[in-house]
Image: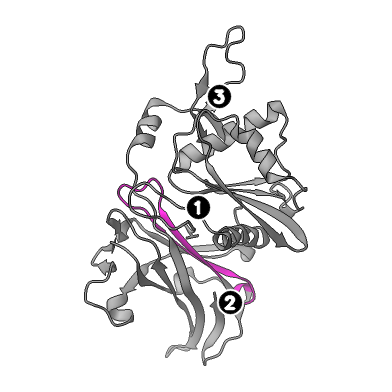
Amino acid sequence: MPGHGPILPGGVRWPATIVMLMDTSEIDTWTQQVVERLRSGGQLEDRRVELKREWPKADSAQVVRTARQLAGLANANYPEHVLWIVGIDERARQIIGADSVETASWWAAVGSCFDGDPPDLADVVVTVDGCTLVALCFGTTGAPYVVKNPQYGSSGHVIASEVPWRDGTSVRTIRKQELKALLMPRVVLPDILVHSASLDLFRKEGTDGQLATWWNGSMVWSVESLVPKRLTLPVRSMSLVVEFLDVGFSAPVNAFFRDARELASSDGSPDVRYVGDYIIIDGPGIIETMLMIGNETVPPAADTVAVPAAVTLTMPGPGLASPLIIRADLHPETPTSPGQVGRWRL
């Protein structure tokens, strides 16, 4: 909930087909996470996020293209939210700010290009470094989205509308198998909240006189929404990665889990639980992901102790259109215990 949130992020999802839009604070947080990746040198866009240097024009030609881009992105990511951020130059990796545009009139022009209802829109103004960004968060539960062909009826144009599909960085007409998959019931990703995360670097002289260095850490996160169907996430398919982007270091590590039965008092059967080789999610609940890294994956301490760190847990699962991604961005702090030479906290 990057994280996905993700992630990662997402609005409260209820059983059945109704999915509420994210609230203002969630959209703001999602936008700030993208800005943080810009500052740390990470990847800016992902499959659900697009960055716009300036507002897409609302003239007759450009507005059709904008609607088609949005429909393709929304269809390919159903039922998850998608985000456009206006005011970031992706190529230059700069925050330049968004021009003043009346969102309602712009959205009315874009929405008129849809054959049927367009995606739901929530817009939030986010101020970063004195610049104004506009975050446009779209709900996708009305998919498939269909756009009109503005040339329909003119010479040689017999197709009245199209179902667009986002494929990589391009948009094309949806194919049969993609349309069939789009119309099938989906398992919805739950909303995730990261409560805390830590990473510690230790160094100690061994009995042989050699310095031993190791890391350990944890990330406590919870499922915050109801789930209409049980999620079973196999541990063997998961990946846990520790990154120090400023120094170009990334290392996969093994993940270990503790659920509410070990973290706090429990009724004996929490709705989020670690069972052997699986994490089972039946509803809201809390769990801890632990990690330990030995010498074989430790970068030089001098390169890392003063730079931010990131911990990313990726969890694919049967029935999920995309994996559940949980990310925590940690900042360096002053070590507080003997033998501790590096300390990072969320």
Which of label 1 and label 2 is nearer to you?
Answer: 1
Instruction: Single out the residue that lies furthest toward the top.
Output: 155
**Residue pictured at 47% horizontal, 37% vertical:** 75
Mark 3 to mark 1 CA distance (whole Å): 25 Å
Q: Which residue is mark 3?
A: 148
Q: Quadrant of residue 291?
A: bottom left
Where does the magenta region start and end?
303-329
Q: Which residue is mark 1?
A: 21
User: If you read the primary sequence from the N terminus, does the residue marked by circle 2 or circle 3 appear first?
Assistant: 3
Q: Quadrant of residue 234?
A: bottom left
- Give coordinates of residue 99: x percent, y percent: 77, 48
Pointer 3 local density, CA inside 10 Å: few below 14, some 14–19, many at least 20? some
User: If you read the primary sequence from the N terminus, does the residue marked by circle 3 or circle 1 appear first?
Assistant: 1
Residue 301: give its label.
2
Pointer 1 local density, CA inside 10 Å: few below 14, some 14–19, many at least 20? many
- Give coordinates of residue 232: x percent, y percent: 28, 57
Q: On screen, 228 above or below 306?
A: above
Q: Is residue 274 magenta?
A: no
User: If you read the primary sequence from the N terminus, does the residue marked by circle 1 or circle 2 appear first?
Assistant: 1
**Looking at numbered disc 2 in the image, what kind of residue is underneath it?**
Ala
**Residue 15 seen in the current view:** yes
